[in-house]
Image (cartoon, rainbow, N blue to C red):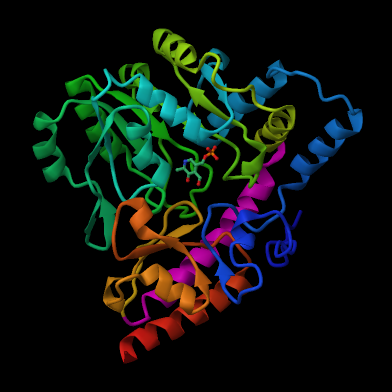
Amino acid sequence: MPFDFETPPDRSNSDSIKWRRYAGRDILPMWVADMDFAAPPPVIDALQQRIAHGVLGYTHPWPSLLEAVVEGIERDHAWKIEPDWIVWLPGVVQGFNLACLLAGEPGSGILSFPPIYPPMLQAPGNQQRQLVRSSLTLAGGRWEFDWASLDALLPVKDTRMLLLCNPHNPVGRVWSRDELTRLAWHAENHDWLICSDDIHCGLVIDPSQQYVPIASLDASVAQRTITLMAPSKTWNIPALSSAFAIIPNASLRKQYLAAARGLLPDVNVLGLVATEAAYRYGGPWRAALLEHLHANAQALHKTVNQMPGLSCCEIEATYLAWLDCRGLHQANPHRFLEQHGIGLSDGRDFGMEGFVRLNFGCSRSLLDEALRRLSLAALAAQAA
Ligand SMILES: Cc1ncc(COP(=O)(O)O)c(C=O)c1O
């Protein structure tokens, strides 16, 4: 069945926060991470059927939902989990904030890897912990962990948890088995908890890459790991607020549930219905989406790298491109690009100066127009 990613619904006068920011201005909204596409048809059908029932009373996750998630994770990511390991959450952000509460005592360090999704920089401080930064580094045209600085950093900080993003927002890396093994070795060696935000795991667009959940490396790593997942990015349903943690270690799971007690709402019934439909029937739509995103990513990569003062690495996963604007020599590249009609995310929010993030989860024609404007902006910067 063909899916149309070229003529998405018009969001310009909708409740979308992405489109509202620039309403009435000629600025293309390519910032916050949702895609411009309607959710997959089986997800919409399931929601319509549930609404038609008419009663929206209290609900807890039901057996066929758990089965769909467990089967989907094994089918798509070769990781066999048990239904009991799942803790439902209204969002992944709540999920990693809760995990921070289990990282040692107040004041303990939590290691993370900027540039990174801004709430992951804020979570340690929110929960009275300290963020320990180990910035990713550009090596041979690829973003990598900075192993040398990481090794030097560790003995001097009271680090109790590793906060990972895999695949990584915003640099689009799918961490390899070797890289994860090396990180896990540190975690075992220093007795850290691992919290891995894998919300983008269904969005590996480079067919030569494979997502590996760090908890699947071996049983011992699984015992110290909280993995966070959701259908929200892959099937474009983030406002339905359905996510989950996978915690194989029973005692860690108990502590996590205790930390959440009284604070988190149950996932709403529509989120749960959409989650089951997405994992059970969303495969063909996801496969078509990945092809569309891969084509967008390739066009973007090729075009951006021909522009003066701009560059970007190959994107392995996500619908987000991390653009290096340092060569534009602008004090505020985000504002400069807004002035040229493109609304992106400011790299400083991700913990790195001189970069912006572009969301290419849109039609090819919108992306082409953004690239045209970007090219004009790059030329203008050069001429200045
Ligand atoms: C890495 C990452 N984690 C979490 C989220 C948000 O998750 P949620 O809406 O479930 O809180 C995003 C959204 O962009 C993200 O990129």
Near-viewer residue (139 or 358): 358
Identified at 22% across, 43% down, the residue is 134
- Residue 356, percent across and down? 39, 63
User: Is any part of residue 70 visible from this angle?
Assistant: yes
- Residue 58, percent across and down? 75, 18
Q: Give the magenta range.
A: 281-308
Would residue 181 be counted in the magenta stretch? no
- Residue 268, percent across and down? 70, 28
User: Is any part of residue 165 visible from this angle?
Assistant: no
Identified at 27% across, 76% down, the residue is 327
Would you say 248 lies left or right of 62 here? left
365 versus 20 height, above or below: below
Q: How many marks?
A: 0
Near-viewer residue (365 or 91): 91
189 versus 38 height, above or below: above
Q: Main secondary structure of the magenta part?
A: helix
